[in-house]
Image: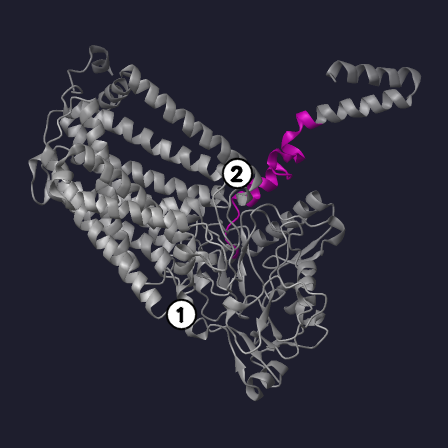
Amino acid sequence: MQLFNFIADAIGELLRGSKRYWIWIALLAALFAQGVFFYIHQMQTGLVVTGMSDQVSWGFYISNFAFFVGIGAAAVLLVIPAYIFRRKDFKHVVLLGEGLAVAAVLVAMLFVLVDLGRPERAWHFLPYFGRFNFPSSILAWDVLVLNGYLMLNAAILFFVLFKHYRDREPQSKLYFVFVVLAMFWAISIHTVTAFMFSSNPARSMWHTSLLAPRFIASAFASGPALIIITLSVIRKNTRYLIKQGVIDTLALIMTVAMQINLFFVGAELFTDFYNEDTHAASIRYLFLGLEGVGKLQPWIWSAILMNVVALTILMIHPLRRNPKTLIIACVLGFLGIWIEKGMGLVVPGFIPTTLGEVFEYFPTSIELAIAIGIWSFGMLAFTLLAKIIIGVELGQLRFSKPEPRSLSD
Amino acid sequence: MSEKKVKKTRADDRNSGISRRSFMQGVGAVGAVTAAAAVAASTPAWGGQSMRDAFGSFFQDQYKKMTPEEIEAALARIERKAKRRFGVDIKCANTPPIPGVVFGYAINISKCKGYRDCVYACVEENNLGRDSQMQYIRVLEMDQGTRKLENSEHYYDPEEVPREGKYYMPVQCMQCDNPPCVKACPVEATWQEPDGIVVIDYDWCIGCRMCMSACPYWARHFNWTTPEVPAEELNPVTHYLGNRPRPKGVTEKCHFCIQRTRKGRLPACAEACPNGARIFGNLLDPDSEIRYVLENKSVFRLKEDLGTEPKFWYFAD
């Protein structure tokens, strides 16, 4: 019964909002609907409506998938300080981090779904009914860890919110066990996602043991960037108190992670170019072009530039502590890594092909529209989750005595 | 046209015989009504198949998990579907592997002249999408003096082949003994058969393309849209794991012409080669030509360093 009240109150909370709230919701819903429209078109015609080909068989969708798994994993950077170091200021925002993880993992999963040639056969993944190639296939691992991470975060989020709703504090040991499990799980989802690429000796650009560490490093730079931006927006638009200490610590984590990430990029460039062999062809294509073509060059160079500028801002203390310049660094770092780890990693892995053919890829407007739809869905999911979280945490959503009529049944 | 009109036309027919005009009207109207009423039977609402077949395909189990009865039902569905889609009576078989046979292939690159007869024979034999221009075999035009794939020309189109200073190297699925594609597939839609052929269950593949990333030989191809074959060019002799018509959204690849080779015939590419460059046979038979080549020629395999153990060799005289 309390659960029913919680759900009803939560829905009530979602239906209460300023004009700006409704405009934001309507905008996201419209963009999502547009994505659905183009996705239906893609389902009817086939993936031929994308820019992908036999040569470059993964593109914008899988690029975004890889990136958003990282964002989901980075929520752990709020969880660890809150639960292991018992930072009160982090504990205050940790639920928002879990909400962000849920939204990011949903986005990642949707990007895989729209990339499937036969989405209606997704049930083939199910144990017993389907045939799950576990533990052989890394994608099977990924399906497992992503679903597990989604359920862990959703369950922890719901459990804590429901407790707070009833004016209680979650204290059970089991809950703590799940929180710790979720921390390790966060690292695992991004590691497995990196392994999806690095496990292929056929694609020499991906086939490096540095890939998983690079994924974690770049996730711990882009994740805090997005969290800082999000918390700043929440601080500006709601009464919810976000302590400066949280932002400061996140900015510091982002600084170190970005340093490590750029070091990794440099190490790869050195290894590839000092004694350049055929395995370096993909990197050459990405940065310098190959056989007269190189559509990704402006992308990767702007990504490197954005990351370097972001890091410079972050490393100069007054600039990092200034909210305005910090936001600039976050936006640049987020976009830089989105390119570097997305299009900058997935696409050149296919160029040249395993038979040495150079064939380029660029996303079509249909791919973009579908991607915009998925991003909007993610932002919508997070907005709604955040609204409930803030409502509960501010004490606006509280269980009051059951109404008389519900006592009768 | 309305229901009313149909009735009137029928009444006219009874009363005054059938005028051509009213007959045609009647046909049109009845057609429209029937179509509207019987959507479930045979209209594109179910992707050009009956509701029963659509459900049957949807819930169809993975090939290796199906009972013999379920496989029979699946084969019948494939034949009905082809009839509806192409108007052609195809025969979809499920010929099992021959005991004591593991297939292997060897190509004599000094005999290959780059004619691409193998490519075209394969397209016709295996019902490859003509509009999508999918080809299982890619003949690479290589520079003399190097085996560097990056230097190869994929789309060579001179007046006359072979060209001076070039040699030709056809590449197709190597039917690896340690196939990375099989390992990569998350739903076991692809596996190695006892006769060594790596096959795909097109009805089970989800189209994630993990296998395409994993393959070092660019052997796997994806149906980005429904592959179209002119009805009159459709090869009606098909196999479940081979050349039966494929849907969109799934991966496919060379399967050593499973519909032919399991009946003791040569693959279409081997038969088509006018230069006798292609040697195909049973690796377990010590008297086979392929065994002679392996034992007496200096053979090499592509990308052996990747540990894929291809059952596809190259040699030169």
Q: Chain of mark 2?
A: A
Pointer 2 with pointer 1, Cβ within 8 A: no
Q: Nearer the viewer, mark 2 or mark 1?
A: 1
Q: Position of residue B204 (x, y in %)?
A: 51, 51
Crowd around label 2: few <14 · some 14–19 · many ≥20 (10 Å): many
Front-lying residue, A124 or A20: A20
Q: Chain of mark 1?
A: A
**Amino acid identity at mark 2:** Gln
Q: Which residue is the extreme one toward the top?
A: A404
Q: Position of residue A203 (x, y in %)?
A: 42, 62
Label 2: element kind:
helix
- Quarter holding residue A280: bottom left
Q: Position of residue A344 (x, y in %)?
A: 38, 51
- Is B3 rendered above or below residue B51? above
Residues in magenta? Answer: B35-63
For image coordinates 67% across by 66% down, the residue present is B116
Q: Is residue B167 left or right of residue B89?
A: left
Is residue B263 visible to us here? no
Front-lying residue, B197 or B121: B121
For image coordinates 73% across by 16% down, the residue present is B2
For image coordinates 34% across by 46% down, the residue present is A302
Q: Earlier in the sequence, mark 2 or mark 1?
A: 2
- Is A85 rendered above or below residue A236? below
Residue bearing mark 1: A277
Q: Which mark is residue A29?
A: none
Q: Which mark is residue A42?
A: 2
- Is B210 rendered above or below residue B302? above
